[in-house]
Amino acid sequence: MHPDRLLATITLLILILNKAKDCQMHAPLQEIPIQSLRKGEKGTVTSLAGDDCEVARLSALGIRRGVEVCALQNGGTCIFQYGCSRVCLRTAGQTKVMVARSR
């Protein structure tokens, strides 16, 4: 292959890869329940819903929209960490904590 044609092909591939990367970065985030995070997986809180008292309690504990959490245990009793704090949340209740998986 001629060197000029090879350079043009490589340049085109780089442009395509950069465009694909940009599309992934701007793709809409998928919200999932916090208990769906696997052990060690991180996510960012996107919304809290449920009983006003429970949502206020979680907010007072620092669990708010935009906070990054890390799952320590998932399932019916979900344990997650944010900052230096750990929280246990029973997922069978009416309170829903939704997160977006970290990339």
Image (cartoon, rainbow, N blue to C red):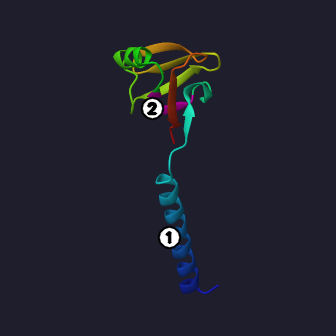
Nearest to viewer (mark 1 / mark 2): 2
- Give whichever of discs 1 and 2 has the lower sequence position: 1
30 in magenta: no
Q: Quadrant of the N terminus?
A: bottom right
User: Which residue is drawn at the image coordinates 58% and 80% (left, top)?
Assistant: 6
Q: Does residue 15 sit above or below 49 in this rendering?
A: below
Q: Is residue 26 left or right of residue 37?
A: left
Amino acid on which disc 1 is placed = Leu
**Magenta highlight range:** 41-48
Amino acid on which disc 2 is placed = Ser
Can you give x and y, in whole percent of width and height, for residue 34 in the image?
55, 27
Q: Nearer the viewer, residue 77 or 103?
A: 77
Residue 53 appears in which quarter of the rendering?
top left
- Residue furthest to the front in view is 51
* Prevalent SS, magenta region: strand
User: Which residue is drawn at the image coordinates 47% and 26% (left, top)?
Assistant: 49
Q: Which mark is residue 47?
A: 2
Residue occupied by mark 1: 15
